[in-house]
Image (cartoon, rainbow, N blue to C red):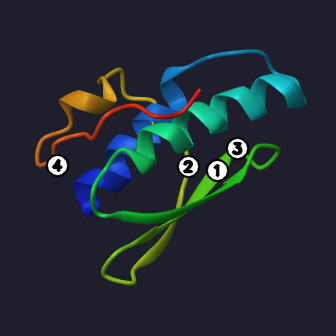
Amino acid sequence: EQAAVVAIGRALAAWKMTADAEGYGQQTARAACFARRLPEVAMVDTDPLGHRLTVQFTSGWRVGVVPVEDGVAPEATPGLSALGPESCP
């Protein structure tokens, strides 16, 4: 689950849109889509203006996720579970 949090944070930082509310909305929506593809993620709440996500795992652990800007692709995170098919727009 910790690897998933880092990968979701990387996903949140990976897609640079614009610095306005619409851009943050698109960015958090794409990161939420990435998070929902992880099998251990039960629920994702987005906060585009706060530029963060709240993720609840199937274990019950709930955590706030902020952007992780380290230049590593989200899918390249060590220990990450296999991603499910992309089903978000």
Q: Which residue is mark 3?
A: 51
At mark 4, the secondary structure is: loop
Q: Residue at x 55, y 44 (%)?
A: 32
Image coords of residue 30 (percent x, y): 57, 31
Please report contact status of discs 1 and 2: CB closer than 8 Å, yes or no: yes
Q: Is residue 12 left or right of residue 22?
A: left
Q: CA distance from mark 2 to mark 4?
A: 20 Å
| Residue 67 visible in the snapshot | no
At mark 3, the secondary structure is: loop
Q: Nearer the viewer, mark 1 or mark 4?
A: 4
The image quadrant of residue 19 is top right
Q: Which residue is mark 2?
A: 66
Q: Amino acid at mark 1?
A: Arg
Q: Amino acid at mark 4?
A: Ser
Are there few (<14), some (14-19), or many (20+) residues within 10 Å of tag 3?
A: some
Residue 52, above or below 15:
below
In primary-sequence order, the first of circles 1 and 4 is: 1
Q: Quadrant of the C terminus?
A: top right
Q: Quadrant of the N terminus?
A: bottom left
Q: CA distance from mark 3 to mark 4?
A: 24 Å
In primary-sequence order, the first of circles 2 and 3 is: 3
Q: Nearer the viewer, mark 2 or mark 4?
A: 4
Q: Is residue 4 left or right of residue 50?
A: left
Q: Nearer the viewer, residue 63 or 34?
A: 34
Q: Amino acid at mark 3?
A: His
Q: Which residue is mark 1?
A: 52
Q: Which residue is mark 4?
A: 81
